[in-house]
Image (cartoon, helix red, strand yellow):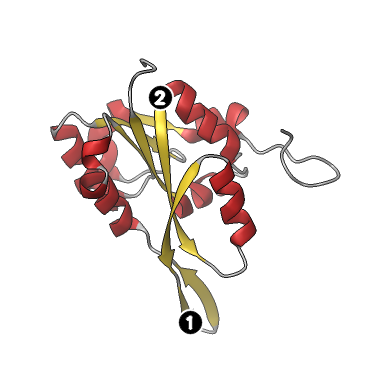
Amino acid sequence: MSKSENNYAFIDSQNLYRGVQASGWQVDYRKLRLYLKNKYSVQRAYLFIGYLEGNEGLYQMLQEMGYILIFKPTMVIRKNGNETVKGNVDAELVLHASAITYNDYDKAIIISNDGDFYCLVKFLDERDKLLKLLAPSKHYSGLLRKYDGYIVRIDKLRKSLELKKTKTSGRSKP
């Protein structure tokens, strides 16, 4: 990658978080941001996330790491006595990558394993604007198999991207 490239990353935060969590680890978001910058010349990394009151410290920390947060209001879904918080960010991610910022970047990286992004991946590929599709694990949608040449599995980057907890604070080492 040339350092003069102006590439953007569009990250489905819930998909990334749950995808690596299912594999038994957590992403160090500082390391991920540096990886995207150094490996793929990502100038802007948009993190699409459901907004929950009380998480302002997390949001501030992510912004300090270099992410641009795009918030989606959340809803509480009650089913069979259980509550689930939903903040589906798919539409916002597609809108930003295909319209709002489309003319501002050279190539896009999509971070998700969700087949709902098939139309976006196809759109970007047809216009030579797709750089990579980073899937959190080997369990990505069959709809995306057509784009295997673009796929980088984040679980294979675990050694370099895993959050290492310290014994005292529980936060990653700087």
Q: Residue at x 52, y 49 (%)?
A: 17
Toward which corner of the image does residue 10 lie, by quadrant?
Answer: top left
Identified by mark 1, the residue type is Arg
Structural distance between the alpha carbons of marks 1 and 2: 42 Å
Label 1 crowd (10 A; few <14 / some 14-19 / many >=20): few
Which quarter of the rendering shows the N terminus? top left
Q: Residue furthest top?
A: 2
Q: Position of residue 130 (x, y in %)?
A: 25, 32
Q: Is residue 172 left or right of residue 29?
A: right
The residue sitting at 64% across, 57% down in the picture is 57
Q: Nearer the viewer, residue 69 or 151?
A: 69
How many numbered markers are drawn? 2
Name the outermost residue toward the bottom.
81
Relative horizontal placement of residue 81, taking residue 93 as reference (left or right)? right
Q: Viewed as shown, does residue 170 lie left or right of 20?
A: right
Q: Quadrant of residue 122?
A: top left
Q: Which residue is under mark 1?
A: 78
- Asked if disc 1 and disc 2 are in contact, CB closer than 8 Å, the reply is no
Q: Which mark is residue 46?
A: none
Q: Amino acid at mark 2?
A: Ser
Element at badge 2?
Answer: loop
**Residue 102 or residue 134, whichever sits in front:** 102
Of pointers 1 and 2, the one earlier in the residue sequence:
2
Looking at the rendered structure, the secondary structure element under dot 1 is: strand
Q: Which residue is mark 2?
A: 41
Residue 35 picture location, percent across and down: 51, 27
Where residue 12 appears, x then y in whole percent? Answer: 41, 50
